[in-house]
Image (cartoon, rainbow, N blue to C red):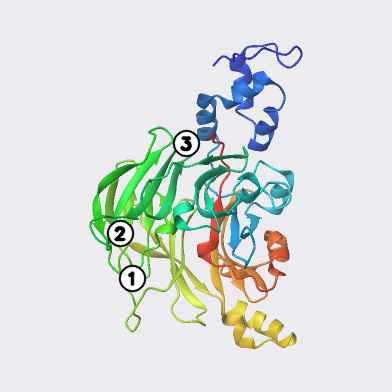
Amino acid sequence: MRGSGAAEPGLWDGDDDVLVTILALLPLKALLRCKLVCRRWRHLISDPVFVSDYSRRHARLHSSGFYLQRFLFCEPNPSLKFVSCDPPEESLSGSGRPCADSEPSPANLIEDENGVRIWHSCNGLLLCSSFRCPDDDRVYYICTPPTRQFLPLPNPGCRIEAINIAFDPGQALYRLVCVAASELSTQHRQILVCSSHSGPWRKSGKPFLVSDELLLFERGVFWNGRLHWVGRGRSALRFHVKDEVLMEMPMPPIPEGWSERKLGYFGESGGHLYLVEIYGSVTTAFDVMEMARDYSGWFVKYHVNLEAVARDLARSLLQRNVHAVDAYKFSVLHVVHRQVGEEEECFMVLRIPRGFALYDLKKNTAMDIGDSMPQLMSIGQEHGLVYTWERVFQYMDTFCYL
């Protein structure tokens, strides 16, 4: 690949192919800094072929971290915190991922007088929109924090129920999937799609019937080349993004005596699709289920028992004159896979009264937050902020130009 920019003396006098080979080996943060060296280097790094090759070479299986979003009364933008999932020593060294102190939030990148909120995320791309405005006036954006870019999306021209991103970094191609109201009836929905290569929105397939069992279309999860939607009822859907095929997805039966599904968590982590259902407000024992790649069904991946964590928390709360029963009021925020040396850790991030807790899913033990995810300690001190898994947006290092 040859660059067209003029070569500055002393920077590089060799073949561009050799320079591109060297640049492709750099971590993302260093690569983005190289864009500032000169016009020629910026041209090479911005080339779509280079971006695609670099994204394929450096595609990550594990997430870099996640955003916590909380809505505050009369604030122009939601409260937004980024938590790194990398081991603390790697987070300090810097590798291109956002951090709470240095990387701007979408609200600072996107210029929208109505404020900005996150709706969806997928492999490093964030789907945002105007915040405090009527639905008809809402503008949607794609945002890439590492490259500090945002792009307004074309208006689908219909009543939008949700828009999801499906992005495969190895292909450097993103697709947008919109679930919209249908003219057929109030119970029908229509899928519309567009992509970074194909231009404007277009209808995909025929309208499909949605029962009154609320499906969480806003929280679609991209895994195995498909977007997955679950809800509080008995049905669930998966949409093959490339082939544009919509199908039912098997779900565990709702236990007898319960009228709806009690979702505790639904998301992708480390190449796995996970589901947690928690029935009862003070339940400390539950299962983390994983979907088989051939969609033959869910199977139990981890058994969780938080009784010991709750007992330790209860003693701490009593010392602060807080009712001990609050120790059993927790929620699952995120499942994290990360590489520590030659081993892989898998743990849950839990929201508990007055803070957070980490639970090692492989060892069935609590983890020390200060040693594992110290950023959570300062966030946990913010009283009155309630976070749920539906307001957690996974983030992954991705090099992508819009």
Mark 3 lies on residue: 170
Instruction: Say whether marks 2 and 3 touch (CB < 8 Å).
Output: no
At x 41%, y 50%, the residue is 223
Residue 391 location (% of width, % of height): 54, 62
Q: Nearer the viewer, mark 3 or mark 1?
A: 1
Q: Which mark is residue 373?
A: none
Mark 2 vs mark 3, CA separation in Å: 26 Å
Residue 56 location (% of width, % of height): 50, 34
At x 48%, y 52%, the residue is 137
Question: Which element is circle 2 on?
Answer: loop
Q: Bin the neighbour count of mark 1 within 10 Å (Cα to Cα): few under 14, some 14-19, many 20 and up.
A: some
Report the front residue among 161 and 33.
Answer: 161
At x 63%, y 36%, the residue is 28
Mark 3 vs mark 1, CA separation in Å: 35 Å
Q: Is residue 163 visible?
A: yes
Q: Is residue 21 visible?
A: no
Question: Which element is circle 1 on?
Answer: loop
Q: Which mark is residue 233?
A: 1
Residue type for callout 2: Met
Report the front residue among 188 and 340.
Answer: 188
Residue type for callout 1: Gly
Q: Residue furthest right?
A: 10
Q: Bin the neighbour count of mark 3 within 10 Å (Cα to Cα): few under 14, some 14-19, many 20 and up.
A: some
Mark 2 lies on residue: 249
Mark 1 vs mark 2, CA separation in Å: 13 Å
